[in-house]
Image: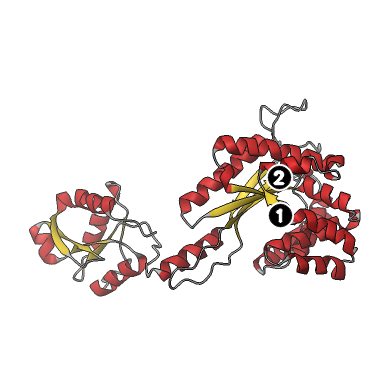
Amino acid sequence: MADRAALEELVRLQGEHVRGLKQQKASAEQIEEEVAKLLKLKAQLGPDDTKHKFVLKTPKDFDIAGQFDPMIPDAECLKIMCEILSSLQIGDFLVKVNDRRILDGMFAVCGVPDAKFRTICSSVDKLDKVPWEEVKNEMVGEKGLAPEVADRIGDYVQQHGGVSLVEQLLQDPKLSQNKQAVEGLTDLKLLFEYLTLFGINDKISFDLSLARGLDYYTGVIYEAVLLQTPAQAGEEPLGVGSVAAGGRYDGLVGMFDPKGRKVPCVGLSIGVERIFSIVEQRLEALEEKVRTTETQVLVASAQKKLLEERLKLVSELWDAGIKAELLYKKNPKLLNQLQYCEEAGIPLVAIIGEQELKDGVIKLRSVASREEVDVRREDLVEEIRRRTAQAPCAC
């Protein structure tokens, strides 16, 4: 048990090291190398009989006779990615797709030694940031690849297009003789058929330079990037890289199955932090505030010793389904309460005062216009609903 505990600690430390490298935006090659070390350590752990055993399950329609079509869930993931990015309204985007089998087949026919596949792959992955000549110099000068081999790679990886490019490469004299490349191209052709049926093929580009450096990908890989548009007044040119990515990794989950069963997997991730930075930058340029809460109304008081009345009112609003809140101070200053609403982007303030309590009304204030009206308490919920239903959301 002591040996296992020591190994588990090594796994934990290596996991933290990998996460740290990603946060520091280390090179893809360095991250790939450290991830490989992490996977080796996890493999050494093997199954832990002292923990709850779990069973890996595959889709019900999957069978070993080959009736399962992996391109259907792959196409669904791309459809989901496009729907998410469209709904965010962060600008026009393009999803680049490739297949690790095509990459490996291409490296093989170009003459890349097997031992250099992954390191050359990481060089190719830089083509979205630097020109081909710099990538070639890295391959030849730093990684020892023969110049003629690099030139052959360059003929392929600088190509991008749609299904017509897939069909063209299926007829390529060299690639058509490589089993891996043909399998990848055949699946990619089928994927484009499904993407056309889903109505998103115009958002997808087959890009031979897309490499996605991590070793666990086994099939289709993809990455979404924002299309550069002229910066609007006050905006800096956007340079956030990809905003979503994913792919197929059929060999990864099965590593943790004691029986070694193959588990088909495909997935995607959205670059939340990068998307936030884009949204924040654009809102700042437009001088719009970013809402940090969904609160519709702040329950405030104009005088001291009205905490109980604020609690009563906020409870009534909660019961009616209104998103309301109040400051936790017993006697907050009205100015501080109003400033809080402006900073958080809360559109309305329901103000309680001694006179309002006597008259049976609530003073409802619009934060944006600073306009105030007295609303009968029994009508307050409907008035808040009416106002928030027609108010534009800046969140």
Of residues 216 and 340, the one nearer the viewer is 216
Crowding at dot 1, Cα within 10 Å, few <14 / some 14-19 / many 20+, comes out as many
Q: Is residue 281 visible?
A: yes
The residue depicted at 50 percent of the width and 64 percent of the height is 278
Q: Position of residue 147 (x, y in %)?
A: 88, 64
Q: Looking at the image, is 255 positioned above or below residue 118?
A: above
Q: Position of residue 336 (x, y in %)?
A: 29, 73
Q: Upstream in the sequence, badge 2 or badge 1?
A: 2
Under circle 2, the secondary element is helix
Residue at numbered disc 1: 210
Which one is closest to the eye, mark 2 or mark 1?
A: 2
98 to the left or right of 230? right
> What's the residue type where badge 2 is placed?
Leu
Q: Residue furthest left?
A: 359
32 to the left or right of 354? right
The residue depicted at 65 percent of the width and 45 percent of the height is 162
Disc tally is: 2
Residue at numbered disc 2: 165
State how far apart marks 2 and 1 are (Cα): 15 Å
Under circle 1, the secondary element is loop
Of residues 148 and 137, the one nearer the viewer is 148
Q: Image quarter for residue 70?
A: top right
Query: Residue 71, which numbered label?
Result: none
The residue depicted at 78 percent of the width and 36 percent of the height is 261
Of residues 61 and 233, the one nearer the viewer is 233
339 to the left or right of 177? left
Q: Image quarter for residue 26?
A: bottom right
